[in-house]
Image: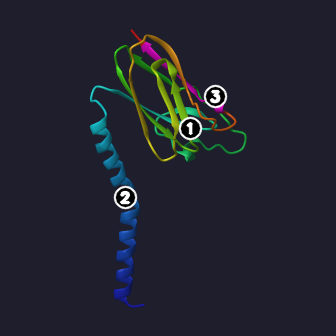
Amino acid sequence: MNFGQKKLDFLFLLMLIGVMFGVPVMISLYDRSVWADKIDKDAKIYTLTGHAKKGWLMGDVKAYDVLSFGDKSRSEEKPLIEVSKGDLVVLRLKSSDVIHGFSLKDFGVFITDGIHPGKVTLVSFRADKVGRFTFSCNAICGTNHENMQGILVVKA
C-alpha cells in the first residue's frame, strides 16, 4: 500500500467518525429547536422515562443506565413532581425499553397509542387542582407494570 492510499483511508476514517458523532448531535440540536417552538416559555418541563423493571424514572434514562447484574437489584423511588397551582406542566415522556402508556386521570391525560423507545411524547396540562395525584403506565409493559407509578403534587 502506498502513502496516497493510506492518506485516503485515513480521510475516510475521519469522515466516518464525523458522521457517527455528528448525526446524533445534529438530531439532538434539531429536536431542541423543534421543542422550543412547541413548548411555552413559562412551562415547567419534566422528563420521565419508562422502564419495565424500574418503573417511571426522572430524567432522560437510557436502557444501559439501569442495567444491574447479579442480585444487585435496588428499589427505585417513585418519581415526585412538585408544581404550583396554575403552572403549565409539560411532560416529556420517553421509554428506554418497551412500549409504555401514561395516565394522569385527574387532569384528563391519557396516552393510549404508546410511548415508543427512542421517541418523545409531549403531554401538557394546566395544574388547576391542588393536591397529590398519581400517574401511572396504562399499557401492560411487563411483570412489574403495577410499580410504574409516580406522584404529582400541586401546591396552592
Badge 2, how many Cα within 10 Å: few under 14, some, many 20+? Answer: few
In the picture, measured across the screen, residue 96 lies left or right of residue 25, that is right
Cβ–Cβ under 8 Å for marks 3 and 1: no
Q: Main secondary structure of the magenta part?
A: strand
Picture quarter containing residue 6? bottom left
Q: Can you give x and y, in whole percent of width and height, for residue 24 in the image?
A: 39, 55
**Mark 1 residue element:** strand
Q: Position of residue 13 (x, y in %)?
A: 40, 73
Number of residues whose C-alpha sits closer than 10 Å to that of mark 1, classed few (under 14), some (14–19) or many (20 or more)? many
Asked whether the residues under the numbered discs 1 and 2 touch, taking CB atoms below 8 Å apart as contact, a structural biologist would say no
Check residue 23 in the rendering and tell me which mark sits there, or answer none.
2
Magenta residue check for 95: no
Nearer the viewer's eye, disc 1 or disc 2?
Answer: 1
Tell me the amino acid under the disc marked 3. Answer: Asn
Q: Amino acid at mark 2?
A: Val
* Image disc number at residue 147: 3
Residue at far top of view: 156
Q: Which residues are magenta?
A: 145-154
| Disc number lying in front (3 or 1) | 1
Please name the residue shown 33% across and 54% down the image: 26
Q: CA distance from mark 1 to mark 2?
A: 27 Å
Q: Amino acid at mark 1?
A: His
Tag shown at residue 45: none
Q: Which mark is residue 100?
A: 1
Instruction: Residue at 50%, 28% (x, y): give it.
Output: 110
- Residue at (58, 44) in percent of width and height: 98
Sequence-wise, which precedes: disc 3 or disc 1?
A: 1
Quarter placement of the C terminus: top left
Up/down of 95 relative to 110, above or below: below
In terms of sequence position, does the residue under pointer 1 or pointer 2 come before the other? 2
Picture residue at 72% right of the left edge, 40% below the top: 71
Q: How is the image coloured?
A: rainbow
